Image (tube, rainbow, N blue to C red):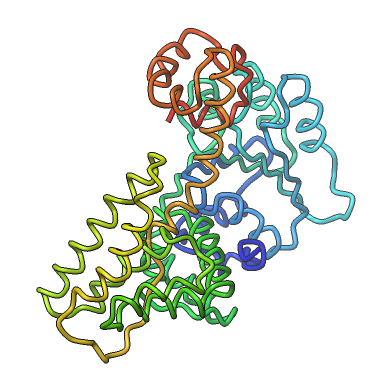
Amino acid sequence: MLTEKYKPKTTKDIVGQNSVVEKLKYWFVNWKPGSRALFFYGPPGTGKTSIVTAFSHEHKLELIEMNASDYRTPDQVEKVAGAASTQNSLTGRKKLILIDEVDGLAKGEAVAPLVNLIKNSSFPIVMTANEAWDLKIRALHEVAELMQLKKVMPSSVARKLKDISTREKIEIDDGTIKSIAENSAGDLRAAINDLESLSSSFRESKVSIFDAVRKIMKSESAKDAKSSLNSVSEDPEYVFWWIENNVIEEYKDPEDLANAMRALALADLFRTRIRKQNWKMLGYFIDMLTAGTAIAKKQKYSSFVMYRPPEIIAALGRTKKVRALRKEACKKIGKYLHESAAGVNAVYLPFLKIISQNMDVAASFGLTEEEMEILKN
């Protein structure tokens, strides 16, 4: 995956977190036994773990990585993390301990051993978390310096994506890169994943989808426009989003554009009827999408337009995991409530969020911690 291939090897590769890198360097040089740990916190994809691993690689440190969510009890924390914090390096190199996702500790009592090992560690410790203000880990503030990582600026994300696309020979225009960067909400990892997904989509369907869109846009014949979908493997709804995203670039005359948008609005109306299992509307949907768009213009536009992939596809790709977790959680709850997943999502979730404040909802319905977190948000 591109996220692994372009994972930072040195701190110079870190994007948009210069002040955090400098803080880590200063803290490490001045650390001595009894000093405070360093606590990085911030949204996913901002580089919390990457900064530490890149710094360790750059300075040839022995990095001991642990994920706090893997150690559920005080005994586990004390046994595993405690040993790492006192035993000398087998290689003779300087050692750095990284404890990831400390906000994933199952219980607050597991924090006490962590506080003790920081106080007594023979080696510097860095912790990471998405959120540092959870009450169960508040005690860590007493023994650690907090450093917030903010979302990466879209301009910085775009530069990184441009660099990757150049190295990988991915044919993608600047407008699409800017769109991915802006939609990433500061999550560089998600942006790189979106770039990879789109590039794969291009490789698989570039000729067919581009040709179909171009034929619809350039054609002056309703019949020719309708035939454009004959050799396209993609779902007509996918073609709809491509047309909707690019028609404004193709139709320069305001009246032509207005007519095309009316045709697409009607196509969208038929599309919603299809989703309600009214399959008779499919023919009307395709007619308005293809012929309706084609004959909306008074003239054929000969200028070349670089068609861009629809922004909604990138957005759906980025939220795919979240939507899948929510759906799976709703299915589990639905089995107990004799309700469909959609019914649980629409009716019961607001009440479950309130109930979860005084009841272990996850245990009651057999939900994982990750599923429970998705339902709370």
Give coordinates of residue 27: x percent, y percent: 57, 50
Which residue is more in the foreground, 124 or 245?
A: 245
Camera-nearest residue between 54 and 116: 54
Q: Is residue 13 left or right of residue 267?
A: right
Report the side of 208 relative to 240 (left or right): right
Asked whether 94 or 299 is in front, the reply is 299
Where residue 108 sits in the image (x, y, percent)? 59, 18
Is 170 left or right of 78, judged from the image as shown?
left
Image coordinates for residue 332, horizontal then vertical, percent: 59, 22
Q: Residue at x 25, y 68 (%)?
A: 292
Q: Residue furthest left?
A: 255
Locate the N terminus by quadrant: bottom right
| The C terminus - image quarter | top left
Vertical placement of 283 versus 325: above or below? below
Residue displayed at 14% across by 68% down: 258
Vertical side of 371 occupied by 232: above or below: below
Position of 81 with respect to 276 (left or right) is right
Q: Is residue 262 above or below residue 213?
A: above
* Numbered circles on residues, count: 0
The residue positioned 22% from the left and 63% from the top of the image is: 263
Frontmost residue, 44 versus 18? 44
Question: Which residue in the rendered view is the most extreme toward the right?
Answer: 90
> Residue 337 in the image: x percent, y percent?
52, 13
Q: Which residue is drawn at 34% across and 76% down?
A: 225
Q: Which residue lies furthest to the bottom in this view?
A: 302
Q: Is residue 282 above or below residue 288?
A: above
Which image quadrant for residue 169?
Answer: bottom right
